[in-house]
Image (cartoon, coloured by chain):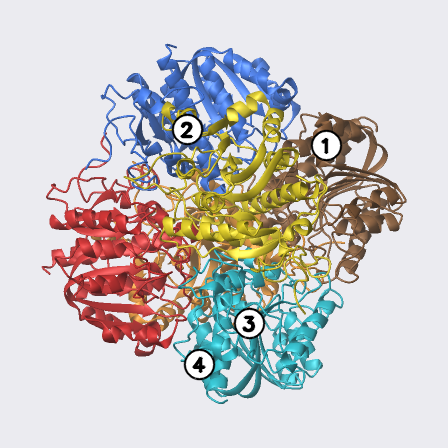
Chain colours: A brown, B orange, C red, D blue, E cyan, F yellow
Amino acid sequence: MDLWSAPGEPIDALRSPRLAHVPTFARLPLSRDLSDPRIKGVFLGVPFDTGATYYSGARLAPTYIRIESRLLRPYNYVLGVYPFKVLGLVDFGDVDVVPTSVEKTLDRVEEAVSEISSRGVTPFIAGGDHSISLGVLRGLRRRKPILVHFDSHLDYWDSYWGGERYTHGTWVRRAIEEGLVRGVVQIGIRGPQFSEEDFSYPRDAPVDFTMVTIYEARSRGFGWLLDLLKGLSGDIYVSFDIDVVDPAYAPGTGTREVGGFTSYEALELIRALAKSRGNLVGFDVVEVSPPMDSSNITSLLASNLLFEAASVKAYQVRYGL
Amino acid sequence: MDLWSAPGEPIDALRSPRLAHVPTFARLPLSRDLSDPRIKGVFLGVPFDTGATYYSGARLAPTYIRIESRLLRPYNYVLGVYPFKVLGLVDFGDVDVVPTSVEKTLDRVEEAVSEISSRGVTPFIAGGDHSISLGVLRGLRRRKPILVHFDSHLDYWDSYWGGERYTHGTWVRRAIEEGLVRGVVQIGIRGPQFSEEDFSYPRDAPVDFTMVTIYEARSRGFGWLLDLLKGLSGDIYVSFDIDVVDPAYAPGTGTREVGGFTSYEALELIRALAKSRGNLVGFDVVEVSPPMDSSNITSLLASNLLFEAASVKAYQVRYGL
Amino acid sequence: MDLWSAPGEPIDALRSPRLAHVPTFARLPLSRDLSDPRIKGVFLGVPFDTGATYYSGARLAPTYIRIESRLLRPYNYVLGVYPFKVLGLVDFGDVDVVPTSVEKTLDRVEEAVSEISSRGVTPFIAGGDHSISLGVLRGLRRRKPILVHFDSHLDYWDSYWGGERYTHGTWVRRAIEEGLVRGVVQIGIRGPQFSEEDFSYPRDAPVDFTMVTIYEARSRGFGWLLDLLKGLSGDIYVSFDIDVVDPAYAPGTGTREVGGFTSYEALELIRALAKSRGNLVGFDVVEVSPPMDSSNITSLLASNLLFEAASVKAYQVRYGL
Amino acid sequence: MDLWSAPGEPIDALRSPRLAHVPTFARLPLSRDLSDPRIKGVFLGVPFDTGATYYSGARLAPTYIRIESRLLRPYNYVLGVYPFKVLGLVDFGDVDVVPTSVEKTLDRVEEAVSEISSRGVTPFIAGGDHSISLGVLRGLRRRKPILVHFDSHLDYWDSYWGGERYTHGTWVRRAIEEGLVRGVVQIGIRGPQFSEEDFSYPRDAPVDFTMVTIYEARSRGFGWLLDLLKGLSGDIYVSFDIDVVDPAYAPGTGTREVGGFTSYEALELIRALAKSRGNLVGFDVVEVSPPMDSSNITSLLASNLLFEAASVKAYQVRYGL
Amino acid sequence: MDLWSAPGEPIDALRSPRLAHVPTFARLPLSRDLSDPRIKGVFLGVPFDTGATYYSGARLAPTYIRIESRLLRPYNYVLGVYPFKVLGLVDFGDVDVVPTSVEKTLDRVEEAVSEISSRGVTPFIAGGDHSISLGVLRGLRRRKPILVHFDSHLDYWDSYWGGERYTHGTWVRRAIEEGLVRGVVQIGIRGPQFSEEDFSYPRDAPVDFTMVTIYEARSRGFGWLLDLLKGLSGDIYVSFDIDVVDPAYAPGTGTREVGGFTSYEALELIRALAKSRGNLVGFDVVEVSPPMDSSNITSLLASNLLFEAASVKAYQVRYGL
Amino acid sequence: MDLWSAPGEPIDALRSPRLAHVPTFARLPLSRDLSDPRIKGVFLGVPFDTGATYYSGARLAPTYIRIESRLLRPYNYVLGVYPFKVLGLVDFGDVDVVPTSVEKTLDRVEEAVSEISSRGVTPFIAGGDHSISLGVLRGLRRRKPILVHFDSHLDYWDSYWGGERYTHGTWVRRAIEEGLVRGVVQIGIRGPQFSEEDFSYPRDAPVDFTMVTIYEARSRGFGWLLDLLKGLSGDIYVSFDIDVVDPAYAPGTGTREVGGFTSYEALELIRALAKSRGNLVGFDVVEVSPPMDSSNITSLLASNLLFEAASVKAYQVRYGL
């Protein structure tokens, strides 16, 4: 009478309807046993939104992403891989965040990711607001990956409201200052800015920093952007702020910017990494805010982005990258 | 790193925020091991709505009731009991329903409830539409309990649409015909009816059948109704159609009738059974339809009704009934 | 293959599910043939909201009231009558309102009601904002009924915004000035007012004017209020502003006031008229605003109020009043 | 005082505002009189969702598609035809489905479509879940058309949950097995699949089976896809699962897949058939689920797709195809 | 062309429709000039939710309470006072909270309230989660009032998640520990608790502490509860957690408990204080969470509670208390 | 303690969180002092929807556009200008419309715009239904600009419902008849039409009238359309009906047409004018209907369109046009 048979094996939808049972990610086994050698990837939730400067609500994202993930099936036709099976993917549960403290939460995120990563397991993370990515990168500090950052916002402000240094708008700068990343590729920037000085930081940053606005992506063409991603190599961490997608496709987020990518493009952007020489060491999709959503389509998109990211990793594992 | 310590022990909200982790009922352990002698009660979901004659959507109820149940704490102050601990309550998962077939689903419900009940375990069930209660009663057929049926509708029609005998509007008659119940107490009937003949069945039924319309309840007084419940004895099965509550308090249901009970009254109606000499052999709350709901308040109410029902059972266990 | 057999005969829900077919009121026949002697009552929609001073949206009320009315069954158990059959009720369709003009719309409402009434047929009307009741009363001017006005607002201001005399806040004064009513009974007034002078008009009005605030109703008791209604006699027109009901029960309205009646009380208020010596010459439920509603519960309540009103009339017809 | 003058003539919006009156499709006449020779096309609703394997709600689609269709005007500028007038289009009402039985419902759908088709009338159908298309094809079995199937899902599974052969995921296989179609053209497939074996059926199927994934459509270009459609000939039946469109444009459906077509493309896909040598023998738009929708935009899109399909047929009638 | 004439004078709704202009509280003047001697009361917003342990969203409450407050008119008929005019009420704007820090936010709340109070001005506050009331009480520390605390929760836990002492569940204990209140009257407690020890704190607290559960209120009767409030004297601060009201009347809050007060009762509870010998030194309504709301009815109720509280103060000013 | 320092200077989001304070447009100063020479542009709301022929709700647009505009920052990166600072932009408040009268409202709009324009100040307007643009053009009659009209509808009908000449569907014809515009460029027309005669008016109109359907735009290419806009010269007034954008991007509008522009394209269409030799004398975005919206994304888009329009004007001011 067990619900699950093995890591990477979801409850079979042809035996048990998709709406049945406790909603784990993709109906995969719930497990915290990292000593199981079959487990090479985990889904991890971070239900936190105290780093948000505008609308809150991202603390509900792991719940709703799990719900909408029940529709995910095991095979990625485009890449030709079975991500769940290849990675022995399980639902690891959530980080026990501290809702009243960004800094304590970052510690707990770091601790969880560090333990997962130290086992050679790749985390696929559902935030939370974007501040949590700093905790993840700290947990991966031995990797010092290139940060591939999809977002409509720059996220490299120094501080807010008289000295708040840990928010969803400052984590990129902190990650660079703390030496956590080898470089940054930022994609999708758009919308009104504070001033033209906003764009000077990438030039002055102590790491390689490539920034691609959506205007540049549109004028150079989407193929050019895919090629840029395919050209990456080495350890890569991908942080995907759902607001890089247009509010039509992803209304459920706190700091929306009109004029973004479509859902099809979002899938292609992730998928392009399978064709790179990069090695995916972790992935997060953040800033999904279910209370702002329309019939959960943003959580649905996020669950598909996690599927694509797991597929990229499985592709790399399977084809020897 | 295990999420749970023992049956009846939810994840501690003072350690891990309530929104964290996979939403099991009341954050209790997920377990299907009925051989564990600590388990005397289980939460069971039946995600099914094919028996509905009007709006569908009840198939989503177990999911959303679990989500809103995260707010439940372990102690019932009014009754002075710890229902989770006393019953060793766990989340058993859902019945693997067959969405395209009422009859096959009833078989599967019967099978699950029969197995649970044969172990001496009491099921606390979240439907699904009301047709599923027939399956539950079949699973409890050795008990042949009195059916305490809260509802705004009669549910004892013979058939619909040229011979459909298994629907959410016919299950009471089927249960009587199949000899599954010792008697029926029906509470809360209201709204327009087909004809005055609708009210003749209770008089002609082969079992004791008490029907209390809401008009009778209001004119005799709520205290009278509580006394009626307190006067029950023997094995009792409670089937609670959420539409007995007013749409203001429970908008999320498929066949709404205005002019119903308040949420406070609903809690009191369940709680009254603790003061009866009846023995609760099972409980269901049905017809919660999340797509019809307003910010999940109906699922929240349902989760509290399940809490009160478990408290009644715990009270009976604890105080020797 | 006809959908309907006769006036007053809805499509049978035991043959055809309630969600099937074009949503006429209560699934009754669509007919504009007032020469049919079987027709003694009609449902009439007035999809209009230009008289509203605050939120608009009531123009959608006839559509959504029809949708939710599909749940109505033919028999009123409390009063013991079959309103559809007794009145040969049909759905007459809507008035062809002029959305950009209150005054032209009032003319069209008057014309429709006058024609209906001249045939001895009783109109049961779904507004529309409350300004439309003036058009109805003009159409019934030969009756000069007592106006029984349920509302949280006074609706007897003289004008708005520099001379606008026809709005949902001025129609009571206009009806009195135009000599359309024999008296006014206003029930349910509450909420903040402009000044204490607001309450002087009833004293000075040229007709009998009884005003009952909800505070008075609560302190004297609901039974007292029912008795007041039962004491009425002669021709009566009932205008029911849905905002007299509390926003919990009727969120879908434009000018909400907290602290109102429950849905159960609303039904009882209408039903009390069956026990009066009054003769119901028409009924409207107005100010339902579907875009403000929560899962259509306000439209559902409105459809039940129309059912109760038709039952009152049927009771009067059946029992010789 | 009749609402309508003739088949194909909607209530004039310049006389009566669009929100007025009972919502028939496009405000066209409600008629079941197929002996009227002016009627060459009918709108038919199938309010059914028991064939759905995931979210329910499609049983409400005919209601909400009718509501949103009130905005449709009579002239198709792009094709240069008047579809309502050319086809004498009327609203035929709905099939009296049996909500608790897929198989009985398929019988009733078949019966209705067969009667309509035997009169030489073309049905334009609003489902319902996709299982209903099997009933339609049975009703058109004398035609044995090519099935043009727009969908994000394959719908040719053999069975679900231990032997359920009639669901929204199996109807294509059943239609082929029952010899109802001459060939299949499937367009828009995407999303995670069960396994790579999923794609073998088209190769082995006993009829011509062309499958175009969205990836193929995107890489070959949309013009290529339009040309494929324009190349069709003979009798054609089009079944349009609304989930082939992206959830941004069509959130109101039960089994959403991100990365789909835009609404503009959807219109163009239908319209392309006007330029083919195919003969449209029927059309359905299915899987619209109003409870999942955001402010009814999916029902609005569905009503426009029905308009385009009727325009294609009118174009064929008008220009001699 | 100025929008406003004087403190306490809202924009006239008979000149300018209620939906026009920037939504200040009750359309009153926006002013930060506390040196104006006409100003004896201010509306103050605290858009903050980082103290919440469950759903977030209360940071949006000041925005939506302002929007719904546009319906407030200047005269309180039940108390016979003009609260805006008597108090010269203005909208003071919001506290510049620090979303990432409860403690820094408490400092800023204290600072604002202290400044307001030092001018002899009474603050009427819209939170924000309940943690902000600690900041308010600090700002009023020279008053050391009795805290009248309406809530379904106890809010006197010591800490959460390993040492978090400043949350919406700990502020009452902090206020007592910091010597900010002379006594506590807690009204409306209900729902599941952690353990029976939860109820021991009031007995051991160093100040007078009266706790009234809703069960006690219901069994003793509502009149008893009103009398309890009327019996208060001395300086009083009222903190009104909107979740003391039932979710039917106030769905828009983060930690809902079924079985609460009605909106009519909530108004009466505040109003009773006018008949006490207490002196209202401040008022807050907290925990309104617009993203959880249904068509803003919770914000509407909150705006009416602020109106009643201002009326109580005006009554005291006017009638010499 | 003042909230604002100077025209064009919003409250700093790095000091005060964006959700704080009364929601003026873009958190800019609220001011009606047109004598201030620093003010060269104003935001003006027109909360009116009585000109709508279908769904109402646009009267709420100024409120919700202000709310969503809080996210706007001061710098337009694409054009390289600071629109708020360059124009000294302030929130002027709303026109005191007359909800029951289109014609009186047009007078008041004209009066306000005339006064603003006579000071050399450019109005950036949030309607309101589209009828209000006629009032704006009357207020700008001395300019007699070219009207650049983005819309999915033609809006040049002669009258509705027996003589209503002032509606959101007739204002273009009225503006031409009244000699208010030098020419018309209409962009984005689509959807079903009444008849082929609908397209004859532009040929017969007494001014230059260019009409571009979306089919033409798509077949010629978006670059062609941008060039058309860049080729304009002289005084230009832009009226942007939000329904020119697809319902996926702008669901919150009353008369939706599927198959429209994306949000990215909408921004580009406005921005193209910066590269023209036209002189922007005013801008409106109309038909935003918050009650129809999904989580306010339409209001968000409208606020960004206003930002782009202000940027175009600032670009012209800054670079000498």
Give the alpha-carbon distance from disc 1 to disc 3, as whole Å: 49 Å
Give the alpha-carbon distance from disc 2 to disc 1, as whole Å: 42 Å
Name the residue beneath numbered marker 2. F205
Give the alpha-carbon distance from disc 3 to disc 4, as whole Å: 39 Å
Nearest to N terminus: mark 3 or mark 4? 3
Residue A198 position within the rendered picture, expressed as x and y whole percent measured from the top left: 78, 47
The local secondary structure at tag 4 comes to helix
Name the residue beneath numbered marker 4. E220
At label 2, counting other C-alpha atoms closer than 10 Å, the crowd grade (few under 14, some 14-19, many 20 or more) is some
Residue at image position (54%, 66%) is B314
Q: Quadrant of the N terminus of chain B?
A: bottom right
Q: Are marks 3 and 4 in contact (CB under 8 Å)?
A: no
Residue B148 in view here: no
Chain bearing tag 1 is A
The kind of residue tagged 4 is: Arg
Residue at image position (26%, 63%) is C172
Q: Which of marks 4 and 2 is in front?
A: 2
The local secondary structure at tag 1 comes to helix
Same subunit, tags 1 and 3: no
Label for residue E90?
A: 3
Chain bearing tag 3 is E
The kind of residue tagged 1 is: Ala
At label 3, counting other C-alpha atoms closer than 10 Å, the crowd grade (few under 14, some 14-19, many 20 or more) is many
Same subunit, tags 4 and 2: no
Chain bearing tag 4 is E
The kind of residue tagged 3 is: Val
Name the residue beneath numbered marker 1. A217
The kind of residue tagged 2 is: Ala
Q: Do the residues labelled 4 and 1 touch (CB within 8 Å)?
A: no
Q: Are marks 1 and 3 in contact (CB under 8 Å)?
A: no
